[in-house]
Image (cartoon, grey):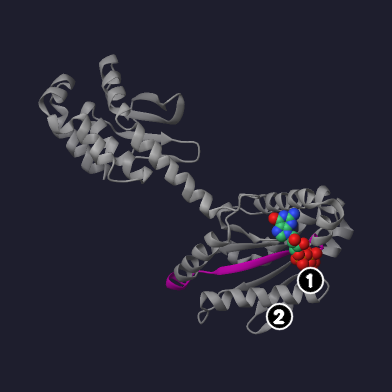
Amino acid sequence: MWQESSNLTNAFGDLSIGSIWQETPDCSESSLVSQLQTTLDLQQQLDIFSMSAGRVLPLCGMTLNTHSSNLQARGSKKGAYHHQSKLVLENQVLAEISYDSAHAFTPLVQRQLLLLESEWLFALRNALLVSRLQQMALKDPLTTLGNRRFFDDSFVKSVQLAKRHQLPLTLLLLDLDNFKQVNDNSGHYVGDEVLIAVADCMRESLRATDSLFRFGGDEFAVLLSDSDAEHADVVADRLLQSIYTNAFLASHNVGCSIGMARLSAEHQPRDLFHAADEALYQAKLSGKGRVSQYNGGRIKLLEKAAHSLLAAS
Ligand SMILES: Nc1nc2c(ncn2[C@@H]2O[C@H](COP(=O)(O)OP(=O)(O)OP(=O)(O)O)[C@@H](O)[C@H]2O)c(=O)[nH]1
């Protein structure tokens, strides 16, 4: 896409900046505005904007930094010259844009870009709003982990992907032990802090934080792919260590049980979930603070029970 825009840019490259604005009325502000209004997708807006900016000065890269994302126009590369600008609407900084080019950003070019940026502001604000709403709809507001809806979506996609490419995938379901007593003894607010601390422990123990979810209540899920899925018992062990050695959680006597199951060829998403759920149930039944693994119809209790970790710490 950026390649296309570079070609376009090259086509205009022979024209002076001034002549671009005078001789190409199709690049006019209203034309850019109407193009930007065709989408609420930030990446698409950036790609559209980069086409117009590339007519002002041949560009080799463009980056948009917002509060929650860092996007690059497709095919962006570093250039010898660099220019940055804040996109501000009604005293609010919406984003920061960075341009890269093999050519210098003269004061005239900067002014032309500024004019162009002003045409993006309203469409950008709308796209940012939509992006924020989309993120909110998929996040658990208390822990900021993915919520149940996000899990359902990611889970089905991950199972399909793993089966298609014959990649390993392991699901871990984690349920806190004795959490109700925290609420009962110390109040709901402290209960919330416990849930946040557990989420932090999970983040610390895992590399891909986008595979962590809170279902609601004191139930969490972890989706492990690739090498992490192969060594899920090690990951589960790390999770237990992190939770059982956390001083705040220990002070409230909160532990956890984990059930895990590995995707097999005949599994549908529902089967994998049920297998991990069954393993979790057995972990609870066997005295909590344990990891158990669903193993082709059998449940194997792993040796490293959290109680022994706690005793060792
Ligand atoms: N503070 C807080 N508590 C919640 C939230 N959502 C659910 N709960 C409480 O979480 C508790 C979950 O209940 P259980 O899983 O039966 O509690 P438990 O003591 O961990 O039970 P075991 O799993 O058998 O050890 C209930 O008391 C719910 O009211 C929340 O967002 N914040």
Which residue does the image show at 51% across and 82% down from the upper left? 266
Which residue has dot 2 on it? Answer: 299
Res 24 visible: yes
In the depicted structure, whether residue 36 falls above or below residue 283: above
Q: Of helix, strand and loop, which one carries label 2?
A: strand
x%, y% of residue 132?
48, 44
Task: Pick the residue in front: 236 or 257.
Answer: 257
Which residue does the image show at 85% across and 51% down from the upper left? 186
Task: Pick the residue in front: 302 or 139.
Answer: 139
Task: Pick the residue in front: 304 or 49.
Answer: 49
Q: Marks 1/2: CA distance?
A: 13 Å
Magenta highlight on residue 93: no
Local crowd size for mark 2, using a 10 Å CA cut-off: few (<14), some (14–19), many (≥20): many
Which residue does the image show at 43% across and 40% down from the upper left? 128
User: Which kind of residue does numbered mark 1 sit on?
Assistant: Glu
Q: Which residues are magenta?
A: 163-179
The circle on residue 282 is: none
For the C terminus, the quadrant is bottom right
x%, y% of residue 62?
35, 34
User: Which kind of residue does numbered mark 2 sit on?
Assistant: Ile
Which residue has dot 1 on it? Answer: 303
Which quadrant does ligand 1 occupy? bottom right
In front of the other: label 1 or label 2?
Answer: 2
Left or right: residue 133 compared with residue 143: left
Left or right: residue 268 compared with residue 103: right
In the depicted structure, whether residue 83 falls above or below residue 94: above
